[in-house]
Amino acid sequence: MQDPSTVEQQDGACVALEARRFDSVNELECGRSPTGVETCKWSLSFAVRDDASSSFAWSYSDVGESGMIECHGATITSLTQRQITGTFDAVAQKLVWEGQTYAPAN
């Protein structure tokens, strides 16, 4: 488990999230099929970029989005044209991203 003090000290790169993948806790809308709306887990993964930022790849609905993020303490902010925000609770290992809760992927 990530040391919570490490998360609180983040200022730039999101070291507590790098090389990790998270899946949405709930099944969410994943697009349409001939039988109607389909649901699935959304996923979010993070990677090392540099000391100032990290990269993310987010698969949600039938869309994929990627870019760079910064972490300041437990607050996550994207460096993309459409600003995305989130928080990470290192003790509970829960990530909230654009209003949805994610947990570490198995």
Image: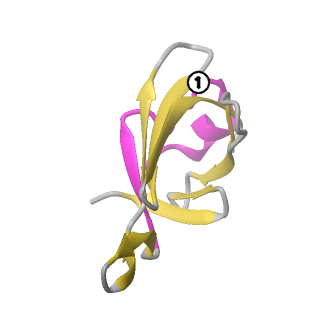
- Percent of width and height locating residue 28: 47, 73
- Percent of width and height locating residue 43: 40, 54
| Residue occupying the point 54% across, 29% down | 67
Judging depth in this view, the residue of 9 and 105 nearest the camera is 105
Judging depth in this view, the residue of 50 and 98 nearest the camera is 98
- Percent of width and height locating residue 93: 50, 58
User: Disc 1 residue type?
Assistant: Ala
| Residue occupying the point 46% across, 76% down | 26
Q: Is residue 14 above or below residue 44?
A: above
Q: Is residue 15 in sight in this rendering? A: no
Q: Which residue is mark 1?
A: 13
| Residue occupying the point 38% across, 42% down | 20
| Residue occupying the point 59% across, 46% down | 4
In the image, 20: left or right of 52? left
| Dot 1 crowding, Cα within 10 Å, few <14, some 14–19, many 20+ | many
In the picture, residue 68 is in which quadrant? Answer: top right
